[in-house]
Image (spheres, rainbow, N blue to C red):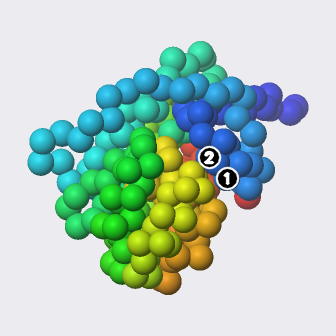
């Protein structure tokens, strides 16, 4: 007598980021649907970067309405210079200001992942990567601002693009800096029964 096999839960990706979807695909997973949670991403008074990154991933996951049998994955990438959280760059001037701050210094890229399984259990992990920029000249900063790829990015840069040539040091997860740390994501998906092997 064979036991019935329960269908694997459908995975909802709580992010409209094409980069996160691409990274999830590297694990052999395509989300069943995409949801873009609308949450307030303002840091709380006195909130430290690690706590902020973890909270945002959890709030994004909880903000998605799930149907029975669905699971959700959400993430957040926070760039921090010491205790200071650098927002997403909304304007070219934001990109310029952030690159001036990061020039010649190391900073932390905190990438959190939250999975709520079909059983309702919430699991969270955090990846911390140290990134060091070379000392940037005003001309290098202007050239990067002009290329436009830093807009909408935490810290004002995208490591998967031209900014990679400006980074002299990285210790941690390259995929985490891109937006979804694959080692931590794989562990969470396996624990939730969404990934075998």
* x 59%, y 76%: residue: 165
Closer to the camera in the image, 183 or 22: 22
**Image quarter (top left, top right, bottom left or bottom right) of the C terminus:** bottom right
Instruction: Give the class, few, some or many, for how many residues have Cα within 10 Å of label 1's Cα (few <14, many ≥20).
Output: many
User: Where does residue 3 sit, x and y in percent of width and height?
Assistant: 80, 32
Q: Is residue 144 visible?
A: yes
* x 37%, y 32%: residue: 59
Instruction: Give the class, few, some or many, for how many residues have Cα within 10 Å of label 2's Cα (few <14, many ≥20).
Output: many
Residue at the far right in the pictured view: 1
On screen, residue 72 versus residue 3, left or right, reads left
User: Where does residue 93 sit, x and y in percent of width and height?
Assistant: 38, 50
Rendering quarter of residue 63: top left
Q: Which residue is mark 1?
A: 23
Closer to the camera in the image, 155 or 57: 155
Residue 30 drawn above or below residue 22: above
On screen, residue 125 versus residue 27, left or right, reads left
How many numbered marks appear?
A: 2
Determine the secondary structure under disc 2. helix
Q: Which residue is mark 2?
A: 20
Determine the secondary structure under disc 1. helix
* x 22%, y 58%: residue: 84
Mark 1 and mark 2 in contact? Answer it, CB < 8 Å: yes
């Amino acid at each position: 007598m064979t036991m019935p096999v329960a269908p694997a839960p459908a995975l909802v990706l709580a992010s409209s980021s094409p980069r996160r979807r691409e990274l999830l695909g590297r694990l052999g997973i395509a989300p069943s649907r995409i949801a873009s949670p609308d949450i307030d991403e303002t840091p709380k008074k006195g909130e430290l970067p690690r706590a902020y990154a973890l909270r945002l991933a959890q709030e994004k996951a909880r903000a998605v309405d799930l149907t029975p049998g669905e699971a959700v994955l959400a993430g957040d990438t926070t760039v921090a210079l010491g205790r200071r959280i650098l927002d997403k760059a909304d304007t070219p001037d934001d990109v310029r200001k952030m690159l001036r701050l990061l020039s010649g210094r190391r900073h932390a890229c905190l990438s959190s992942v939250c999975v709520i399984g079909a059983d309702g259990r919430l699991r969270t992990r955090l990846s911390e990567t140290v990134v060091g920029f070379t000392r940037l000249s005003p001309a290098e900063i202007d050239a990067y601002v002009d290329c436009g790829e830093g807009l909408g990015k935490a810290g004002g840069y995208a490591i998967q693009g031209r900014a990679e040539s400006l980074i002299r040091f990285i210790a941690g997860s390259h995929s985490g800096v891109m937006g979804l740390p694959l080692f931590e994501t794989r562990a969470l998906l396996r624990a939730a029964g969404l990934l075998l092997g």
